[in-house]
Amino acid sequence: METIRVQVPATSANCGPGFDCLGLALSLYNVFSFSPNKDALNYTYTFKGLGADLLVKESPANNLIGQAILTLFTKAQQAPVYGHILVDTHIPPARGLGSSSTAIVAGLLLANALLVKPFSMDVLLEVATEIEGHPDNVAPALLGDLVCALVDKGRLLHTSIAVPKDLYFALVVPDVLVSTEYARSVLPSMIKRTEAVANVSRTALFVTAMMQNKTDYLQTAMQDYLHVPYRKTLIPHCEAAFTAALQEGSYGVTISGSGSTLIAYTNKEKAETVAEAMKAIFLSHDIKAETLVLQAAHGGASYL
């Protein structure tokens, strides 16, 4: 069997007020290559790129790629195909950019290519959501662009919006680890009704502003009262970095996923300056940080 290769984009979940339902695909990709071996009895892995030193220490039995592959073969009632998987990571792991979702989506696409009757993208998204537990990262990773997805009474509903092509994203990735589990643990169990109303209105404004390319609305539309105020406390100097991004002319800025990456929505001309302004805040407090300037990934995951 020939080697199968897929690329899966990074994602930025929540987009400010769209907690656990909005996700944005970004033009930064992890690449996965699967070489089937009819004599193999399990999956073996080689890692290169960002975080390879950490990934190689994980138990192969716990790898999300292999788990996703086996899940899809089981669903298809087809005997699994084993072999070797090469993972080339360009997305910073454990920084709120959906690196684990890329592994799930990649595993499903790799397995789907070997099925006698491949599943549709909708079914793949349902399976990815079951594995991940929520769709806000796996949906844009699989489909691209800006996706709203939720599960209602066991049914997965999702819609997509084409992100304006002149919108750029300035990111700063500080050397700060924020686990998703801990980032959820700091959230309150109840909020005021006024804050709930504020989030509903801003989520609606964010979606429609993106549809109509009203970038001057984004600073207000990206304000959040459900998670950002609490997660900011987990990222040193987050508020100062937000302020720096806005002072340099970004349309709006928020935490990417559960952090620690911060993402500012801007234009091509200001993107580098905005990213460097946020980075300078962390560097001034002796915290290492890297910057990225990206656009939306309009096509989602794909075979190479």
Image (cartoon, rainbow, N blue to C red):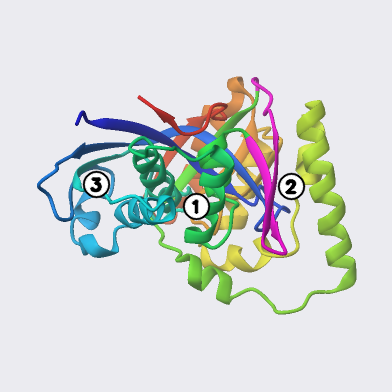
Nearest the viewer among 86 and 39 is 39
The disc, 3 or 2, on the residue closer to the chain's N-terminal end is 3
Mark 3 near mark 1, Cβ–Cβ under 8 Å? no
Q: Which residue is mark 1?
A: 128
Asked whether residue 277 appears in the rendered view, the answer is: no
Task: Give, as a three-letter code, the residue at label 2.
Answer: Met
Q: Position of residue 41 (x, y in %)?
A: 14, 55
Residue 178 image label: none
Residue ID at (69%, 77%): 188
Task: Give, as a three-letter code, the residue at label 3.
Answer: Val
Q: Position of residue 288 (x, y in %)?
A: 36, 50
Residue numbers of the magenta segment: 146-166
Q: Secondary structure at mark 2?
A: loop
Q: Which residue is mark 2?
A: 222
Residue ID at (60%, 51%): 136
Q: Is residue 127 left or right of residue 203?
A: left
Question: In which quadrant will I find the N terminus?
Answer: top left
Mark 3 near mark 2, Cβ–Cβ under 8 Å? no
Q: Position of residue 159 (x, y in %)?
A: 71, 40
Magenta stretch secondary structure, dominant: strand
Task: Give, as a three-letter code, the residue at label 1.
Answer: Ala
